Structures are given as C-alpha cells and as structure tokens.
Image (cartoon, rainbow, N blue to C red):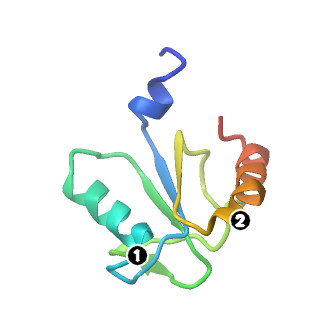
C-alpha cells in the first residue's frame, strides 16, 4: 500500500457532519457512496441522528468503532481545525 492508497482507495470512510436532510452535503455524500462502488464501512458522524440514509450514525469522532481510512468533512469551515485535531487523536492519517 503506497502513501496515497488510503486517500484514493479507502477501505473505510467517515462522513463528519452527516445529515438526514437530502439537500445537505453530508447526506448526498453518503447516498453517493451507497449507490456507487464503495463496499467498505461508511461511518456517519452526527449527534443529531441515530442513522443517516439507513446507515448507523455515531455521535462523535471518538465513538467511531474503527479508525477510518478517509474522513470527509461536511461541516462549517470554522469547525474544521477542531475536527482535524479530533481525527488526529483518533489516529486518522
């Protein structure tokens, strides 16, 4: 596995800021992953919902059951620095 495989060929993906609202990026990303050829774990992170698009959601980054290969941030930009720090503490590269 080369250094870019986790970015270009992730085996697990978390979507931070996942939403049950079909007009929000956090919902569109999950639906596209489900409809596409990605077959690994999809882990939505949102404190608002128990599931997004039928996928079990987690309330926090720390509550994720595994370290995702790729994190997609669908949040307000002002939160990104804190989210990236939390992802680093979780072990996301």
Residue 67 place in picture, x, y as percent: 61, 45
In the picture, measured across the screen, residue 27 lies left or right of residue 84, that is left
Quarter of the figure with residue 59: bottom right
In which quadrant of the rendered image does the C terminus lie?
A: top right
- Residue at 33% over, 67% down: 28
Element carrying mark 2: helix
Q: Nearer the viewer, residue 1 or 20?
A: 20
Element carrying mark 1: loop
Pointer 2 local density, CA inside 10 Å: few below 14, some 14–19, many at least 20: few
Q: Are marks 2 and 1 in contact (CB under 8 Å)?
A: no
Outermost residue, front side: 77
Pointer 1 local density, CA inside 10 Å: few below 14, some 14–19, many at least 20: some
- Residue at 27% over, 59% down: 32
Outermost residue, top side: 2
Residue under circle 1? 24
Q: Nearer the viewer, residue 76 or 35?
A: 76
Where residue 76 is drawn, which disc sits there?
none
What distance separates the C-alpha of mark 2 from that of mark 1? 17 Å
Residue 68 place in picture, x, y as percent: 55, 45
Q: Give the answer, above or below, for where 90 lies relative to 62.
A: above
Residue under circle 2? 79
Tag count in the figure? 2
In the picture, measured across the screen, residue 60 lies left or right of residue 58, that is right
- Residue at 47% over, 16% down: 1
Residue 79 place in picture, x, y as percent: 71, 65
Q: Give the answer, above or below, for where 17 lies relative to 21.
A: above
Mark 2 vs 1, N-terminal side: 1
- Residue at 20% over, 58% down: 35
């Amino acid at each position: 596995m080369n250094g870019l495989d986790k970015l270009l060929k992730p085996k697990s993906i978390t979507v931070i800021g996942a939403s049950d609202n079909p007009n929000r990026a956090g919902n569109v990303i999950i639906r596209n992953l489900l409809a596409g050829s990605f077959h690994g774990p999809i882990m939505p992170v949102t404190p608002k919902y128990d599931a997004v698009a039928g996928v079990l959601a987690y309330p926090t980054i720390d509550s994720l059951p595994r370290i995702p290969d790729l994190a997609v941030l669908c949040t307000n930009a002002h939160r990104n620095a804190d989210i990236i720090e939390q992802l680093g503490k979780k072990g996301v590269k």
